[in-house]
Amino acid sequence: MTTDPFENSETLSAWTSDVLVQRGIQEVAKWRMLEYWMQVELYRAVEAGHAGGWRYLGEYEQPYYTKIPRSGRKYNTKWVDMVLAELNLDSPGRVVWIELKDVGRSEHTLEPNLKGLGRDLAALYTLNPIKTKEIWMNPPPHAVDKGRQEEWNFCASALDVDDHLIAQIVIVPQVMVNEVGGQFVSHNWLDSFEKRATVESTKHGIHIAQTDRGGFSTFALVAPLPKDSG
């Protein structure tokens, strides 16, 4: 399990499924906070060297500047679940920003949750690395996390790289996917994104891949951050 998970959406979906199955997703399937469990297990896999040259950038969720925050938000700052850097943390080849989601167990809330994923993707799609670095170097009052300034100062130089990727990883109980279909998941997710980001489907080139394993379907996407984002 040392290939590059972020080569494309298919490799990311398959790699995530492998990690979660090996770490016992079947045994914790009834736990209603799988998003946090998934975050820990993917962190473990990355730090154990099972994600090629990628390493965790920082010690926790990280703030970023986006042109399109969630509706009703006062500030343009959001927090992302994982940030990984390739090769050297102080001077990486690439950086990837990752959102994780467990959509729950109810068919009644599946569609609203998928639309929420689209809005989160719109925020990632308009992430601005330059303004994010400014937040890390000089956190505004709404983004201050006491005790992390040294970490952010060290990691900030990594954001100068030219190649940034954005990614989302979502797990859905396979029984739900069997009932509504994988296309239902992808369509609602991308449709919400396109409306929120006001971008046409032929322009963004984002593709969602699906892997079925261990009683869950893992949907994942990875794409280059647009150069003119934010």
Image: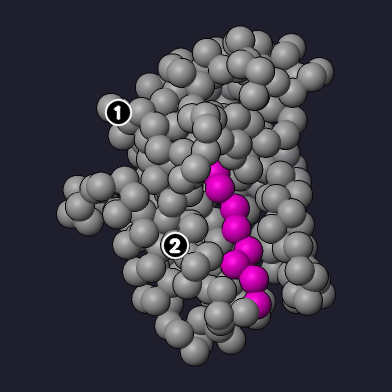
The structure residue drawn at horizontal position 78% and vertical position 76%, both measured from the top left corner, is: 30
Decide which of tag 2 and tag 1 comes sooner along the chain.
Answer: 2
* Residue 183 falls left or right of residue 103: left
Pointer 2 residue: 115
The structure residue drawn at horizontal position 56% and vertical position 35%, both measured from the top left corner, is: 78
Q: CA distance from mark 2 to mark 1?
A: 25 Å
> Measured from the top left, where is residue 195 in percent x and y?
29, 54
- Specify the segment rendered in magenta: 98-105
* As drawn, 53 above or below 7: above
Front one among 108 and 41:
108
> Which of the 4 image quarters holds residue 49?
top right
* Residue 143 falls left or right of residue 198: right
Q: Secondary structure at mark 2?
A: helix
* As drawn, 176 above or below 170: below
Residue 9 can be seen in this image: no
At label 2, which amino acid type do we have? Lys
**Picture disc at residue 227:** 1
The structure residue drawn at horizontal position 74% and vertical position 12%, both measured from the top left corner, is: 150
